[in-house]
Amino acid sequence: MYKEYFPLLTNTETIYLDTAASAQKPDSVLKTMDNFYRTSYANVHRGQCAIAIQATTLYEQARQTVADFIGATPGEIVFTKGATESINLVAFGLEHLIKPNDEILVSIAEHHANFVPWQQLALRTGAIFKTFNVLPDGRFDLDDFERKLSLRTKIVAVSQLSNVLGIVNPIHEIVKMAHAKDIPVLVDGAQGVAHLPLSLKELDCDYYVFSGHKIYGPTGIGVLYAKPEALERLTPYQFGGDMIKTVTVEKTEFADIPARFEAGTPPFPEAIGLAAAINFVSKIGMDTIYGHESELTQYLMERLKEIKNLSILGDYPEKQGLVSFNIGDIHPADLAFVLAKDNICTRVGHHCAMPIHTFFGRQVSLRVSLGIYNDREDIDCFITSLHKALHLLGEE
């Protein structure tokens, strides 16, 4: 029902089941960015000509659009090039507060972007990098989390929605437990932001990050939200133009927040495209999107039950938007090859989350992930093609 908004899906025979990697772009986003480049392109801030003023206005309006969407204020929004940069910005920005034998706590199920930066921060500072486990069904082991949370913990970093397990994590409980010990929490919302209704006031995390391309916007744009006091803790980790008040030979005085974290020419056309994407999903309604994708995910799970010897990573039945699985000893790449011949896009590999694959005794998996443009027919075609692949491989 929503496929008509996406030119690539209406002009080709592609069945796109790889939204967790990157979402397709609606026509409104493409037209907004094309129109901006054609009619209003000029670098933002300080320019006095009409198009420079218009570009700056649109850029700062995009910041307001993001803030309104997640329940924040513009001063709490830092534009980055993606969720990965947002996490690194925080990890480097907190380094001056991390001492030897301090602890950093993340889940074993994190994407590498929310795993490696903290691991490297520990290596640079002498802190202890710790992980807490998931249960056999893929849900966070909150007892293990509570055991490993200590007064030495300086930051907790967890995903809102796992990009491998498809499980919505209990962020409210994590935040409540961490805040009881005055420990800040960073939430990786790269997957969650496009699929779940969101209110950061209710979530109450200290930092929240996401990427534009996962929420039907362009690549090259990301967001770091932080509470004002959390932003004040950070030191800039990139330096250059547009993030300073004064520079002399002796010293530099940085600009106010959030500008001090946006060194250099910002991704302003991409920010404008992100605002268009947010307007697109807001018009549909996040509750509507959540309901549509919840129904499709359950249908996908039901159809997968037809396949013999299929094992799901984290078999908790309440998944949202994606499922990762293996079938016996078949390499997922062999399955994906046949699917691709039928114009069905899926994802093979460790999905930038090797530790959770190791936890479940797997090196790789095949992932199917859904977006607002998918429907039951897409899933039926996928299942038919999967049976075809198994037959060609001699498994049916």
Image (cartoon, helix red, strand yellow):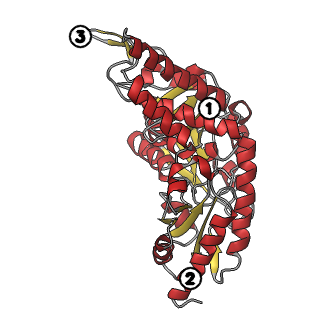
Q: Position of residue 81 (x, y in %)?
A: 43, 36
Q: Position of residue 265 (x, y in %)?
A: 35, 25
Above or below, comparing residue 134 to residue 341 in the picture: above
Tell me which numbered mark, 3 or 2, is placed earlier along the sequence.
Answer: 3
Above or below, comparing residue 58 to residue 371 in the picture: above
Looking at the rendered structure, which numbered label has been put on residue 388?
2
Quarter placement of the C terminus = bottom right
| Classed neighbour count for the residue bearing mark 1: other residues with Cα under 10 Å, few (<14), some (14–19), many (≥20) | many
Q: Amino acid at mark 1?
A: Asp
Above or below, comparing residue 28 to residue 312 in the picture: above
* Quarter holding residue 244: top left
Tell me which numbered mark, 1 or 2, is placed earlier along the sequence.
Answer: 1
- Foreground residue, 371 or 70? 371
Residue at position x 44%, y 44% in the image: 117
Residue at position x 60%, y 81% in the image: 387
Q: Position of residue 251 (x, y in %)?
A: 30, 12
* Quarter holding residue 219: top left
State whether residue 206 appears in this view: yes
